[in-house]
Image: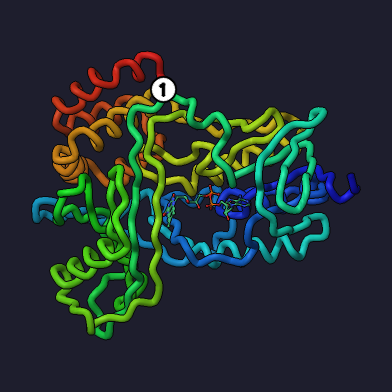
């Protein structure tokens, strides 16, 4: 065993969660002097994702925010509900800017070793975490991993396992047709034959926008099917034929939407973070701000020598809401369009975002549910009672 196989902290996976953790470690006078190993298959900055969120209080690198919108729109049954946000701003960060900036900080910092390696598995050794890779095994007091599904992942009970899957095309047009202040959060006026389906449009200027074709379903589509859907949407909604725009980039993704409880620990000293740590909100797919809050709390604990905390899991109430909504997304997609329509028609958008952020109190939540059709939710409670009763 060589000295360089021992570290204070190993971060396996340099995506959103691994690099957020690096950022918080570098902000800490105590922690930035620790010996840290950052591992990933590739340490090249990646342009694969556009991360959106609506809370900036604790986010790192605020200057990396690419665009901010103050108005959200939702469309269903040919009605458009549009509202200027009062409490929040909706914003996005490009993974290219985020990964490039934080990887540079990591490379420039003497106590951080950056290594490209394929992680094979994790283990424990005399109270330390071990990472087995194709370039050898590495040991640390604490390992934070976002690279592999935990070994006991498949043992966790799961009733609903959907995906939020999508393809986005970033297009540029000659004529000014977009409003860069307004996001089309969900446009449900499209075929729902696969299940819950909508378009999401993020305009970055009057002539540039990311247009995403999004599904909350079990099966993904082929790339050709996503592209055909986007093309037909551009034609129907904006009268843009094939020759009327250029495509600057595309992004494709699949985010888990499950009632499974993700194991917090891989082994006693290896913590799961990010998506594999269960940080995704099951009913929406939003993960980014949860990752940041978790990484901040990890660094605060490490500074005091405490055991890193598992992520702030949803409280029982919000877990039940997620379970009910997941059930409906899977079992009754048709009613979901009506539910989303009523939700955005009858509640302020800020209140809905606050609810999705799990920052509301029970009175708020009762008033939101009172604005929605009751019967499907009673059915969901009945069908999912075995999960709801135990909170499992
Ligand atoms: C296209 C896309 C868009 C998204 N947009 C949003 C959004 O708008 N808002 C939001 O809140 N959430 C969004 N999400 C969900 C979530 O925020 C992101 O997926 C986020 O990147 C998850 O961070 P992570 O660190 O868990 O995983 P990742 O960012 O995927 O990082 C995991 C890292 O592990 C590395 N790795 C994997 N296997 C190995 C191995 N064997 N050895 C070594 N390294 C390995 C990978 O190379 C990768 O760098 C999006 C997801 C996708 C796919």
Who is closer to the viewer here, 300 or 243?
Answer: 243
- The structure residue drawn at horizontal position 56% and vertical position 34%, both measured from the top left corner, is 311
Q: How far across and down, in percent of the image, does residue 139 sit?
A: 79, 41
Quadrant assignment for the C terminus: top left
Q: Secondary structure at mark 1?
A: helix
User: Left or right of 154: which side holds 29?
Assistant: right
Occupied quadrant, residue 82: bottom left
Who is closer to the viewer here, 216 or 209?
Answer: 216
Q: How far across and down, in percent of the image, does residue 143 sit?
A: 70, 40
Q: Is residue 17 visible?
A: yes
Who is closer to the viewer here, 150 or 177?
Answer: 150
Occupied quadrant, residue 114: bottom right
Q: How far across and down, in percent of the image, does residue 196 sit?
A: 22, 46
User: Left or right of 85: which side holds 264?
Assistant: right
Image height of 173 relative to 351, above or below:
below
Residue position marked by numbered label 1 in the rendering: 316
Image height of 334 relative to 41, above or below:
above
- The structure residue drawn at horizontal position 55% and vertical position 48%, both measured from the top left corner, is 58
Image height of 232 relative to 71, above or below:
below
Q: How far across and down, in percent of the image, does residue 174 sit?
A: 27, 85
- The structure residue drawn at horizontal position 19% and vertical position 21%, both measured from the top left corner, is 378
Sort mark 1 into few (<14), some (14-19) or many (20+) by Cα contacts within 10 Å: few
Given the current orientation, which residue lies at the most extreme left position? 78
Q: Is residue 182 visible?
A: no
Occupied quadrant, residue 335: top left
Image height of 193 relative to 110, above or below:
above
User: Left or right of 235: which side holds 295?
Assistant: right
């Amino acid at each position: 065993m060589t000295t360089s196989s021992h570290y204070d902290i190993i971060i396996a996976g340099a995506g959103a969660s691994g690099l957020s953790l690096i950022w918080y470690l570098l902000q800490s006078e105590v922690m930035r002097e620790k010996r840290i190993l950052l591992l990933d298959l590739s340490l090249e900055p990646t342009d694969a994702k556009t991360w959106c969120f609506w809370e900036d209080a604790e986010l790192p690198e605020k200057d990396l925010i690419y665009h901010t919108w103050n108005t959200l729109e939702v469309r269903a049954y040919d009605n458009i509900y549009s509202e200027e946000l009062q409490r929040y701003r909706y914003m996005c960060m490009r993974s290219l800017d985020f990964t490039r900036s934080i990887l540079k900080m990591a490379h420039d910092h003497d106590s951080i070793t950056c290594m490209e390696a394929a992680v094979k598995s994790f283990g424990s050794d005399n109270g330390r975490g071990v990472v087995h890779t194709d370039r050898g095994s590495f040991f640390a007091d604490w390992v934070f991993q976002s690279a592999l599904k935990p070994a006991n992942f498949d043992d966790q009970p799961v009733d609903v396992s959907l995906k939020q899957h999508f393809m986005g095309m970033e297009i540029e047009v000659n004529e000014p047709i977009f409003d860069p202040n307004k996001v089309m959060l969900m446009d449900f006026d499209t075929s729902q034959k696969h299940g819950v389906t909508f378009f999401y449009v993020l305009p970055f200027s009057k002539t540039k926008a990311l247009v995403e074709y999004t599904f909350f379903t079990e099966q993904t589509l082929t790339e050709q099917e996503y592209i055909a859907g986007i093309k037909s949407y551009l034609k129907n909604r904006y009268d843009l034929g094939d020759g009327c725009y250029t495509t600057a980039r595309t992004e494709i993704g699949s985010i888990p939407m499950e009632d499974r409880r993700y194991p917090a620990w891989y082994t006693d000293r290896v913590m799961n973070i990010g998506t594999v740590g269960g940080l995704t909100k099951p009913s929406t797919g939003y993960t980014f701000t949860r990752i940041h809050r978790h990484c901040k709390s990890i660094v605060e604990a490490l500074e005091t020598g405490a055991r890193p905390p598992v992520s702030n899991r949803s409280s029982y109430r919000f877990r039940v809401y997620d379970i009910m909504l997941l059930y409906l997304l899977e079992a009754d997609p048709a009613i979901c369009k009506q539910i989303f329509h009523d939700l955005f028609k009858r509640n302020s958008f800020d209140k809905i975002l606050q609810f999705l952020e799990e920052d509301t109190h029970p009175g708020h939540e009762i008033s939101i549910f009172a604005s929605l059709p009751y019967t499907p939710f009673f059915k969901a409670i009945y069908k999912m009672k075995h999960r709801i009763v135990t909170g499992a």
